Amino acid sequence: MTMNVLPLILGLVLAFSFGTSDFLSKGVTAKIGAYRTTLLVLALSGAGALAPALLLKSSFDVTPLLGAVLVLSAVTTLLAFASLYRAYRRGMLSLASPIANAYPAFAVLTSVAFLGVRFSVWAILALAVIIMGIVLVSTSLSDLRKRIFTRNQPIAPGIGSAFLAAVFFGVAWTLFGYASEHLGFLLPSLAVRLGAVGVGLVLIPVIKPEIGPTSGKWIPTILVMALLETVGVVIFSLGVVIVPSPSTIPILATFGGMSAAVTVTYAIVILKERLELNHIIGIVSLIAGVVALLYITG
């Protein structure tokens, strides 16, 4: 039973780390831009991921297939973070966060399509309930209604970027988990951090991203975000290595998607946003889905 509970515990740590980092990113991207935030967070968290490599098992037996997986994971990770921070900068956290954190659905689809993972109908329903809970607990229906009925205003700025982030994160986490199963911690972690930074630097002359101005005190926040991202990557790798089950990757990705609930909790407590009925329903759905999934996969 311990081996089945462990992915849940690690997933909750993922949720806290990534949810807190996402909440902090809103202010940083407004000061230095989404793309610069992406490169700095990935670079610093990549450097931080080097220390745990001394304790976690790693392999350097890279086949052509694994090499392609590492490269593709670097590219998709860069695109995922750039899309995520762009969505948070342009839109509202309560609207962009649930869409971006729907990436577990794409992780499951990727796992089924490329890794041959098979889930029972009940397990898939449990995953769907958790994802539904993420959306409900992270969405402010009152803000959505205001935007829908406000004339000459976009329904939800940043929604397109948030959807792209969900797709890229789903693929990136699946590739990262696959590489971690075969190569251990070091190379996959470097690929999705420092490798992604390298891709980002190369692409600057090509895509000419909006770098954004540099203003205010943002360095301490970036350092905290990088630390939290490092913790998340280490936890994910640790889970894949300790519990080498085909279902570990999508389960960790699903619980990691609960970071949206953490982000919105910060907004409610710190920013004094009121709790709506859909938030309550979402919390119940999350708890029920987690318990059901743990029972089914146990």
Image (spheres, rainbow, N blue to C red):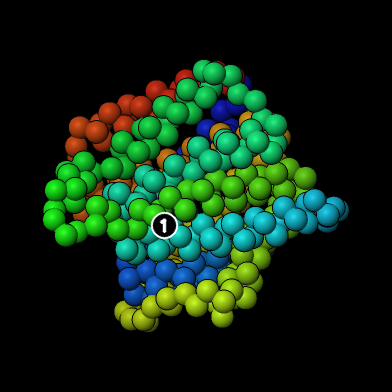
Number of marks: 1
The residue lying toward the viewer, choosing from 8 and 119, is 119
Residue 246 x, y percent position in the rendering: 68, 32
Q: Is residue 221 above or below residue 94?
A: below
The answer to whether residue 81 is left or right of residue 98 is right
The residue lying toward the viewer, choosing from 154 and 130, is 154
For the C terminus, which image quadrant?
Answer: top right
At mark 1, the secondary structure is helix
**Is residue 120 shown to the viewer in this render?**
yes
Q: Residues within 10 Å of mark 1 (few under 14, many from 20)?
A: many
Q: Residue at x 20, y 32 (%)?
A: 277
Residue 272 x, y percent position in the rendering: 18, 50
For the N terminus, which image quadrant?
Answer: top right
Q: Is residue 171 above or below residue 215?
A: above
**Quarter-wise, where is residue 276 in the image?**
top left
Q: Residue at x 19, y 51 (%)?
A: 147
The residue lying toward the viewer, choosing from 178 and 7, is 178
Residue 131 x, y percent position in the rendering: 42, 34
> In this figure, which residue is indicated by the disc labeled 1?
161
Q: Is residue 189 above or below residue 209?
A: above
**Quarter-wise, where is residue 189 in the image?**
bottom right
